[in-house]
Amino acid sequence: MNLFILLQQGEQRLQSNDVLFHSQVDLVLGILRSTGSISSKRTSIDGELHRSVAAALVMAYEKDTTVDIAIRRAETFYGYGFSTKIISYLDAAIANGLLIAKTAKAKGRLDLGPLLQDYLEDSYFNHIREG
């Protein structure tokens, strides 16, 4: 599914009171930060952006789809109202094995890596057992 659609849907879901979704976003964000895919610095400035990226990845997991990136141009990201930093975060996630791509760059169809898949699946089943 197109990255911009996932980002938009993720931002909408962040406005909801969905406890499972918010806990999964926090989990993915923690993984992104712990691997250095997203910096743990400047969270007061870029925290919402970081959560949006994590929310988009959770949306991809929920929909059992890929993250599709057709264009990496900064003008395109800016035109859709998204930060140009997103592409570097996704590049780093590929380098750290969190996303699987055919190249070392975030372009084309990106699959969620096994680490993200496993943690999101565990959080889902733990939520069902607790709920």
Image (cartoon, rainbow, N blue to C red):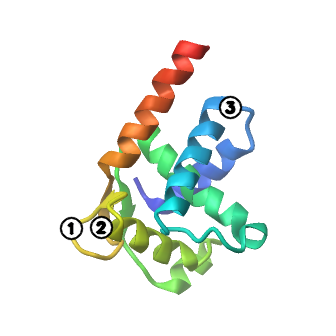
Q: Is residue 47 above or below residue 31?
A: below
What residue type is disc 2 on?
Gly
**Contact? badges 3 and 1 (CB < 8 Å):** no
The percent coordinates of residue 110 (x first, y second) are 32, 59
What residue type is disc 1 on?
Lys
Query: Would you call the spot at circle 3 few (<14 residues within 10 Å), some (14-19), or many (20 or more)?
Result: few
**Contact? badges 3 and 2 (CB < 8 Å):** no
Kindly identify the residue that appears in the image at 61 percent across and 31 percent down. Answer: 20
Query: In the image, 128: left or right of 23?
Result: left
Looking at marks 3 and 1 on the same chain, the residue that comes earlier in the sequence is marked by: 3
Kindly identify the residue that appears in the image at 56 percent across and 40 percent down. Answer: 24
Circle 2 or circle 1, nearest the eye:
1
Looking at marks 3 and 2 on the same chain, the residue that comes earlier in the sequence is marked by: 3
**Contact? badges 2 and 1 (CB < 8 Å):** yes
The percent coordinates of residue 74 (x first, y second) are 52, 85
Query: In the image, 14: left or right of 92?
Result: right
Residue underneath mark 3:
18
Q: Is residue 6 visible?
A: yes
Residue underneath mark 1:
102
Q: Is residue 34 above or below residue 126?
A: below
The percent coordinates of residue 77 (x first, y second) are 55, 76
Asked whether 34 or 74 is in front, the reply is 34
Looking at marks 2 and 1 on the same chain, the residue that comes earlier in the sequence is marked by: 1
For residue 127, which quarter of the picture?
Answer: top right
Residue underneath mark 2:
108
